[in-house]
Image (spheres, grey):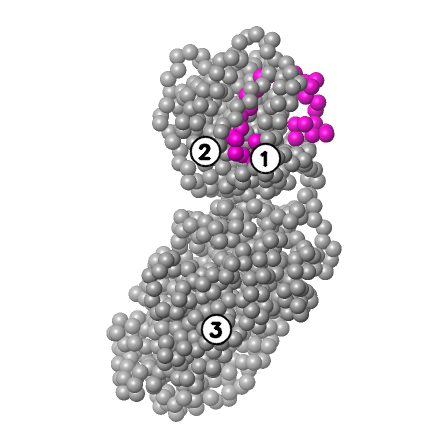
Amino acid sequence: MALSSFLSRLRSSSKPIYSNLKNSFFHKQNTLLSRTLIVGSENSKKPFQSSWSNPLLLMALAASAGSLAVQFPNNDGSSFCDAPNINQIGNSIGGKGSTEYLVKGSYRKVPQDLIDQLKDICQDNMTMDYDDRYIHGKPQNSFHKAVNIPDVVVFPRSQEEVSKIVKSCNKHKVPIVPYGGATSIEGHTLSPNGGVCIDMTQMKNIKSLNLEDMDVVVEPGIGWMELNEYLEPYGLFFPLDPGPGATIGGMCATRCSGSLAVRYGTMRDNVINLKVVLANGDIVKTGSRARKSAAGYDLTRLMIGSEGTLGVITEVTLRLQKIPQYSVVAMCNFPTIKDAADVAIATMMSGIQVSRVELMDEVQVRAINIANGKNLPEVPTLMFEFIGTEAYAREQTLIVQKIASEHHGSDFVFAEDSEAKKELWKIRKEALWACFAMEPNFEAMITDVCVPLSSLADLISISKQELDSSSLVCTVIAHAGDGNFHTVILFDPDQEEQRKEAERLNHFMVHTALAMEGTCTGEHGVGTGKMKYLEKELGIENLRAMKRIKDALDPNGIMNPGKLIPPHVCIIQVYSDGSIFRSEVTNFPTKVQDDGSAIWKDCLFDKKHNLFLRLYKPRAAAAKLPILYFFHGGGFCLGSRTWPNCHNSCLRLSSALPAVVISADYRLAPEHRLPAAMDDAMAAVKWLQTQALLNSSDPWLSDGVDFDRVFIVGDSSGGNLAHHLAVKLGPGSPELSPVRVRGYVLMAPFFGGTERTKSEVEGPPEPYLNLEILDRFWRLSIPAGDTADHPLANPFGPYSPKLESIMLDPMLVMAGECEVMKDRIEDYAKRLEEIGKKIKYVEYQGKQHGFFTNDPFSELANKVLEEIKHFMSENSSKNDANNM
């Protein structure tokens, strides 16, 4: 086909439709936003009410071998973003199997003190205008939405200002969302928790150009197109070319690439050094300007692709390239998309150093014809760019022409004229906007899968069959030279079925790519949209490692919360709308340690609430065994008889005492606030009474057990339950007859109170359990609107039963010297002793919370077991005189 004829067809009936489409699309997005925006104070221009009855929280909880951690927001000034030191799980936005696109989050109004500080830092370079915040709360090219928008938008002018802004936000534990060109499509710049949006577009200076070193130092707000305009007179250019409008900072954050990645690599390969403001305000230089270095951890690569979750990029040193001496752009048509993909693979296998290999299917070409009034053949099409000397570029072109002809290629044309080449590449660069010419009122879901090059043809062919059979309009655009292809799936946002169909197609392509050892995102990044695929692609161990890095650098979880790290690595999440997501599977670093000395089985004890208990008994026991009830800890919000720390503890108790151990579950908060757990604990011991009255329908309890020697042991919140059972059952537990409770063991009982103790205020901070976490557990577990002086939290609270007049069976109370609750536990024991109760208090020097359940096979655990064994022996007498 003659080039002149082809260009004539290309330019025929050309219409200036691109800008109209773009403007129409932006207007459409704003209209959509006005329909979908929800909740919260400034965000909805309505009064915002916050109370414990409607906690606007994002909670993340974790357990590690009996040690607990939680972090979530509330109106006490504590963090309301991602949780520190936590593994998170939940089937929420971004969780495994999620089909949601409206990103939930927690929200509370930014403190006025922080706003005043931001005004001092930024002067006039900040806004709280609703329209400005509204625009910053919705990415331009993304169908993802969030329930909240930022409360404040700041426009720093220097690295120092960014540092001060971040430091202030960290002090107040207010979330931060860095913002650049707003061209990302996976929800990277959404503000689901409100907070502060840091718009970096005013920091766009070119700080230094080093011609001899072929590098440039820039601020993050400069766009790649602006940078290349500046570099062109020097014969240099920056070789990455994502969508128009992208800024260098955002390109680093998403680890983007573009059509030239096949020749020059991705952002990872073209950044030499960064300066980054961390969550505490520190300014970190990640490297030097040397082209290579083996000095220390590669923090540059860590930050590239971190999507603002680890820090705010404030300076970038970029590797530059010489503008090619000569280039040729070619285009070729194919009967099938597989033929086109096969040619792309064959071209790369031939060793030809192409700078671009782009593929479009027939639907995409049709969109271009509609949008621009072209008359291109509506068939799968490949576009190439060859660079080098004039002779070399032409030689490459002819070789590829031959390869194309061997794969049914036709209409192979090429352009060498500068204007003709621009005309050809304009087709590809405006592909997204061209799609909206077919469906102007629709939104686009854009896929970004990438596979090893050898799998590209199969992936595209399989995907294309699924796309063509769908009722939706779908186009295919691929960076075919490096195995990366996009599908633009157009859907009506007002039609839920269409959105679900778009999501189904997206799922299909991603899982097909992952099955071919590919990735869910080649260049767009994760944001909120791709989180749900990360565990399958990377594995849970990878996600835990990323979360530990996040926790180390951002302990308050303020940096772009809710992005990149999947929420299904959380145990529980509570959202602003009151919905709760709790993991069905928890991954523990602690493994079950079963030496075979005890056996166990599960029994249902409460059919209504589907509650189970687990029975343990020594494998060999001659005499009648006492019965020991064990109630697990977890702040009433998490934990289970099945968790390894609980299971190991019960195995050890059963074999070492020896005893029949019954470990009972109870309903957890916040779904079931207290007194639900107390009711379930009572139901569990009542179950034992039923077994005794029936002469035990359970064979494990029919012989060899002594219902007259029952002891109740509770760890942490389980210790709290043990206290309340002691009060409720009274001495001798007559209402359980013929079951007889002889005593109670409280291991670090979880008590609360509004008045702080010395160890709570001054005590050594524990890595898993501290005062902040204790407060959060109480807010989620006690009845809504109550305080930590509630009778179920504080045994000596103003509304608690007067223990002076209540007789109690003997108690053994234990605590670690270094746990935050030590003083409260010690005070509990002393006050009971002062009013004449039989109680023994044991404190383990240098130990923290979970001193037994962390490792029930340790030397310390042996000492704990000896104390319990002695306590049981001392209080197994039929004589009730010791009860007081």
- Neighbourhood count class around disc 2 (C-alpha, 10 Å): few under 14, some 14–19, many 20 upward: many
Q: What residue is pinned by disc 1? A: 759
Counting every numbered tag in the picture gives 3
Amino acid marked by disc 1: Ser
Residue stretch rendered in magenta on the structure: 794-822
**Pick the front one: 690 or 140:** 140
Residue at point 39%, 23% (across, down): 598
Pinpoint residue 472: horizontal percent, then vertical percent.
50, 66
Q: Nearer the viewer, mark 3 or mark 1?
A: 1
> Tag 3's secondary structure?
strand
Amino acid marked by disc 3: Val
The image quadrant of residue 141 is: bottom right
Q: What residue is pinned by disc 3? A: 218
Quadrant location, the N terminus: bottom left
Residue at point 66%, 18% (across, down): 835
Pinpoint residue 463: horizontal percent, then vertical percent.
40, 64
Residue 814 is one of the magenta-drawn residues: yes
| Nearer-N-terminus badge (3/1) | 3
Tell me the CA gap for discs 2 and 1: 21 Å
Tell me the CA gap for discs 2 and 3: 50 Å
Q: What residue is pinned by disc 2? A: 854
Compared with 487, 680 (above or below) is: above
Which residue is situated farthest in the right direction here? Answer: 47
Compared with 480, 628 (above or below) is: above
Numbered label attached to residue 480: none
Q: Is residue 814 visible to us here?
A: yes
| Nearer-N-terminus badge (2/1) | 1
Amino acid marked by disc 2: Asn
Residue at point 60%, 8% (across, down): 881
Tell me the CA gap for discs 3 and 1: 50 Å
Pinpoint residue 567: horizontal percent, then vertical percent.
51, 50
